[in-house]
Amino acid sequence: MLDFNYMVSTKVLFGKNKIERLGEELKQYGKNILFVYGRGSIKKNGLYDSVTNIFSRNSIVYHELPGVQPNPRITSVRQGIKLCREQNIECIVAVGGGSVIDCAKTIAAGFYHEGDPWDLFLLGDSTIKKALPIGTILTFAGTGSEMNGNAVISNEETEQKLAIHNDVLRPRFSILDPTYTFTVPRNQTAAGTVDIFSHILEQYFSPTKDAFVQNRVAESLLKTCIYYGPIALTEPTNYEARAQLMWTSSLALNGLLSYGRITDWATHGIEHAVSAAYDVTHGAGLAILTPYWMQYVLSEETTEKFVEYAQNVWQVKGKNDLAVARKGIEKTREFFTDLGMPKTLRDVGVQENKLEDMAEKTVLYGDVGKFKKLGKNDVLTILKNAF
Amino acid sequence: MLDFNYMVSTKVLFGKNKIERLGEELKQYGKNILFVYGRGSIKKNGLYDSVTNIFSRNSIVYHELPGVQPNPRITSVRQGIKLCREQNIECIVAVGGGSVIDCAKTIAAGFYHEGDPWDLFLLGDSTIKKALPIGTILTFAGTGSEMNGNAVISNEETEQKLAIHNDVLRPRFSILDPTYTFTVPRNQTAAGTVDIFSHILEQYFSPTKDAFVQNRVAESLLKTCIYYGPIALTEPTNYEARAQLMWTSSLALNGLLSYGRITDWATHGIEHAVSAAYDVTHGAGLAILTPYWMQYVLSEETTEKFVEYAQNVWQVKGKNDLAVARKGIEKTREFFTDLGMPKTLRDVGVQENKLEDMAEKTVLYGDVGKFKKLGKNDVLTILKNAF
């Protein structure tokens, strides 16, 4: 096990009607709030009214930043920072999924940065020293953003999608009410499940051999996705399925799996290049790329890890290690396909002549992947195979 | 999944030489420290010198409370509170295992309680509103006290061993350096492993049926004990074994397994009555009682849970559910015995004529257990079977 410092500071309020605690939680952060949300689904399902009523009852002044897109843009961030400065905002409340929360986090950090907020993504995480406090109300299980210090933002001008990570970005509190995800459409539910699954894999496929408890816990979370993902698709109002996926999404990316080992993240790197250029749903991009990444990095050297995966997660049995490993990859692809996810980049409208450019963007700041280091040609091969 | 509020606020500094961070961590809590430790092993292994040198280098004034016993006594707590008040202590540093940490926690809470600190154990957890900040340096993997808000204290006058629980008792930081456990003797290492294992079981055997991810994660931690416990016994300086057990001890009892479900804790309740009367090593008491508790609560109604346990943790196969369940219990007993743990209460010097009294003490404040509720006669039967 590698050395680590553990700090999971987000307070999670999990369960039905936990929103009733919102006023109480906000008290310590101030009375002047930026209220960030997406493209209006919270107005349809009544959550907008619930939140603003709580603001009013607690004499909280709020300013709205609506319309945050999936694959949130740096332009929304700039807009949010401007609002925060003009209105002397003390705290940000993000109501939505990972995109809304990531946008809020970047506003929170950008507020204290003198230059353009895109600088933060280019200058490195240590540039971030301070951020406005954030509270979230989660409406989508997948990104894990509700309990970590990560944010991913797209820059439409440069066709880049980059991430920042810093503990100061962890939400102070997150309200996780699984009933808010009852209305998430089937394909989005599937994409969220794939996103959770991929977050776990990115940490499970690690070059750190000594990570027994981390591996077993990762397998537990993978099994939860396998069990409850399909149930949430066919029974969207099944509370237990929604609750298990929601809590698993938080556990999958709050540090629990990564502390004490090196993690990979190549597939996410490649997918970000794809969805920066095509606005593909992140989970769909991951569903396409993950099995191709697996096939590409499977080698004599890595077979053991793939066997561990196939046996412990998919109960694959057999004497030939390579065959067991391949079966595990096949099971993964089947799982994604059964969830209704696309199989190839072509399926989601990617054009072949863009692959080279995407490969280049993926490795713009250096090789990706730690389980297996990938240069531009490696990435291009994976993209071509996935096309 | 039941509703819950998640807050694991302890910062963990995990790895070799993390003690170098002690001065830095203490800065925010003050310069006047109560230094609590056990019966001198830290003087032999050099840890006492390391800690006091760091105190000196950081101009920290410290007052010592040495000699805290295993199964720590309320008398040590009283002594500590007196010292804190006389010396205007601002923060407590506990160096040792769970006993030392539990003693420190009770001092921290008792400092703000006007009456006798034993009141806290009788009046209920809500009596505790505030506590001095605590930092810990862990030298023993087992209790999980380094990352939670629990403390167990014995009262030698009343022959009682009772627990308090409150989030304000969570250490602010805990330094987990697995090398500090290299010198833990074989039988103590075994007892610690049983303690971790038992903490997991107390939460795994739950009446809450819907706890899929919690169950899978619990099984992960059980497997880690099964894999690394024996290695730590035969190779006491195996870093990975010590590290895996240490981190598992923290994860087993920091809330991760309990959030979202009801937990049992009957076996711990019974063991506390035993070790209050006989000063038996806690882990040894648990090793004796756990299989007897399992046998007693195994019924038509509970077979399913025992089958889940036997299959997922011990890979027991078979068509007869009851036989599979029994095999899982047998495997548990074998695991404890292979670790060198005693098998019966008689083995650890308990006298038969004390069993009735222990059963009475166990249920003094009501029935114990939530997976299966146990009254005095149930407890007495378990004790007699275990005798």
Image: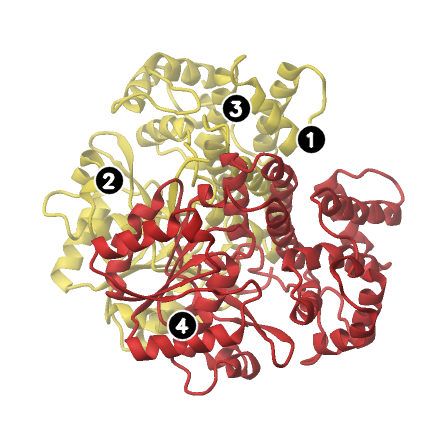
Chain colours: A red, B yellow
Proximity of marks 1 and 4: CB atoms separated by less than 8 Å: no
Quarter of the picture containing the C terminus of chain B is top left
Q: Which disc number belongs to residue B291?
A: 3
Of circles 4 and 2, the one toward us is: 4
Q: Residues within 10 Å of mark 3 (few under 14, many from 20)?
A: many
Q: Position of residue B73 (x, y in %)?
A: 26, 41
Real-space CA distance between mark 1 and mark 3, rounded to the nearest whole angstrom: 18 Å
Q: Nearer the viewer, residue A178 or B386?
A: A178
Disc 2 secondary structure class: helix
Circle 4 residue: A108
Q: Which disc number belongs to residue B325?
A: none
Q: Residue at 34%, 48% (x, y): give it.
A: A19
Real-space CA distance between mark 1 and mark 4, rounded to the nearest whole angstrom: 49 Å
**Total number of numbered discs in the rendering:** 4
Q: Which disc number belongs to residue B315?
A: 1
Of circles 1 and 4, the one toward us is: 4
Circle 2 residue: B125
The answer as to whether the residues below labels 3 and 4 share one chain is no
In the image, is residue A385 above or below residue A325? below
The answer as to whether the residues below labels 1 and 3 share one chain is yes
Q: Position of residue A313 (x, y in %)?
A: 70, 42
Q: Position of residue A287 (x, y in %)?
A: 71, 54
N-terminal-most mark, 2 or 3? 2
Q: What kind of residue is marked 3? A: Pro
In the image, is residue A374 above or below residue A23? below
Real-space CA distance between mark 2 and mark 3, rounded to the nearest whole angstrom: 30 Å
Q: Nearer the viewer, residue A205 or B96?
A: A205
